[in-house]
Image (spheres, rainbow, N blue to C red):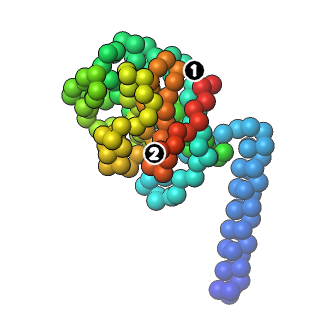
Amino acid sequence: MSSIEIIKIVVIKTLITVVLFVFFVMALRYYGYDLIIQIEEIQQDNVTIVYDGIVKIDRQLVDELNKIYNDEKPNEYVVCLEGGVNLKGEIIITDFYKPTIVEATETEVIYKSCNVGSIGTLHSHPDGICELSRQDIYTFGATKQLLTCVQCREDVFGCFTPTSLDKRLKVIIE
């Protein structure tokens, strides 16, 4: 077999694989299945993340966050968020964990950084303001995280990305 014939075969097989993958993904989306792409893998591969301004979080996780919010008042609290971006471009929060807290007061929380692979942080504003403070913007800007969220009341969150610091994303509790 000549090298041109081998190249033709490789190109055809590659095209078939790409077409099958595209049809597979389209079929999954058509039937409502979400594939979650892990943020850690995306960051390591330098892939551009595309999202549509929607953040989804499970009701059970929100109930756990509400409990922490109420238990920690009047001080702020912080958690590290885990999750990814699905094929619809929605940011999905799948879990969270508490990092090591150095100090927490009514106006700030100092903590050790989140693990690699974390998609971001969520902290509280017990004063009820669901916007980022200057310190929040500075802290978030210094990270490589996809998302930062503020909880300002039970079931009320302001979520932001590096490109939407002045505009809240839509948060859907499922």
| Residue closer to the observer: 140 or 135 | 135
Q: Answer yes or no: is residue 148 visible.
A: yes
* Crowdedness near tag 1: few (<14), some (14–19) or many (≥20) residues, C-alpha within 10 Å: few
Rendered residue at 45%/30% (across/down):
130
- 87 sits to left or right of 161: right
Question: Looking at the rendering, in which quadrant would you find the C terminus?
Answer: top right
Q: Amino acid at mark 2?
A: Leu
Q: Which residue, given by chain and number where applicable, does mark 2 sit on?
A: 165
Q: Position of residue 131 (x, y in %)?
A: 44, 34
* Crowdedness near tag 2: few (<14), some (14–19) or many (≥20) residues, C-alpha within 10 Å: some
Rendered residue at 21%/28% (across/down):
102
Question: Looking at the rendering, in which quadrant would you find the N terminus?
Answer: bottom right
| Residue closer to the observer: 125 or 54 | 125
Rendered residue at 39%/17% (across/down):
68
Q: Which residue, given by chain and number where applicable, does mark 1 sit on?
A: 59
Q: Position of residue 45 (x, y in %)?
A: 46, 58
Q: Position of residue 126 (x, y in %)?
A: 37, 21
Rendered residue at 60%/39% (across/down):
54
| Mark 1: secondary structure | helix
As displayed, is residue 49 above or below residue 135?
Answer: below
**N-term-proximal mark, 2 vs 1:** 1
| Mark 2: secondary structure | loop
Dot in front, 2 or 1: 2
Q: Residues under labels 2 and 1: Cα distance? A: 25 Å
As displayed, is residue 77 above or below residue 119?
Answer: above
